[in-house]
Image (cartoon, rainbow, N blue to C red):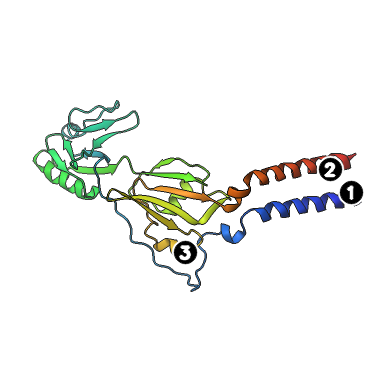
Amino acid sequence: MVKLYIIKVFVFSAVIVIFSACNSVKNLTYFQKSNRGTDTISVAKAYIPKIQAGDLLSIYVSSLSAEASSFFNPFNGTGSAATGTSVGTSQSAGYLVDPSGEIQYPLLGNIKVAGRTTSEVRDTIRSRLNLFLKGQTVIVRYLNFKITFLGEVNRPEVYNISNEMVTLPEAISLAGDLTLFAQRDSIQVIRDVNGKKEFGVVNLNSREVFNSPYYYLHPNDIVYVKPSKFKAQHNDRFITLFSFGTGVLSLLLFLFRK
């Protein structure tokens, strides 16, 4: 009984030390109430991206005549194109927006797309196709809407977004959530704005994140999650102590088992 009691005390003490070294539960909790204690909060206005030079667009046309429509869908499986300014890879092919903000489209020639939304470009192309097709449908999408995650996330990498809208919580879930050592109250979002880098900070512990200008992410945003002060200052020491503690525990279990 005494031996079992000693083991239980040791295990309990080890657990206390380990968890006290990590962040508190409060620091790990998302979307906490503000001092106002309200259960509702306004949400930031939805962000609709506008096309820029260097973007890669997918444009698909269909109509009552599949044969006629195929002329306006020139990309084949290898990513080559019959005409137009385009970029193709083994995974995707599309129209690259040139430095002047234009794409070259079969028969329609140069189309100005920079500074416009995909729905506006869709309507322009559909209107011009009236000369060639009947009952046409046009789908315009981004092929290069990407978000980069760095720092204390479980899967840091570049993520391609399949639609034109993604929130910070949604993107974090794609990255496998934050690690235990992440500073949840100081998430940094790095954004290109008029040729300059803008640095914003978001506090995921607070519900105010929902009306932050960084709640909706923009194409090419970089999300950097800083490590906690504990990890930055004591990471090596914590690993050493944890390894020592588990080694001692194993030894005690071996000795008391005899």
The answer to whether 150 appears left or right of 8 in the picture is left
Three-letter residue code for mark 2: Leu
Front-most of 131 and 84?
A: 84
User: Residue 178, position in %: x, y?
Assistant: 53, 49
Residue placed farthest to the bottom in the image?
36
| Disc 3 packing (10 Å; few <14; some 14–19; many ≥20) | many
Classify residue 74 as left or right of residue 34. Answer: left
Give the mark nearest the N terminus, 3 or 2.
Answer: 3
Which numbered circle lies on residue 3?
A: 1
Mark 1 residue element: helix
Residue of label 3: 207
* Amino acid of disc 3: Arg
Proximity of marks 3 and 2: CB atoms separated by less than 8 Å: no
Q: Assign the C terminus to one quadrant of the image.
A: top right
Give, as a three-letter code, the residue at label 1: Lys
Badge 2 element: helix
Q: Residue at x 53, y 54 (%)?
A: 183
Q: Nearer the viewer, residue 224 or 196?
A: 196
Badge 2: how crowded within 10 Å, few (<14), some, or many (20+)? some
On the image, numbered disc 2 is attached to which residue?
252
Residue sitting at 41 percent across and 52 percent down?
A: 189
Where disc 3 sits, the SS reads helix
What percent of the width, then of the height, locates residue 91? 35, 31
The x and y percentages for residue 108 are: 12, 38
Q: Number of marks in the image?
A: 3
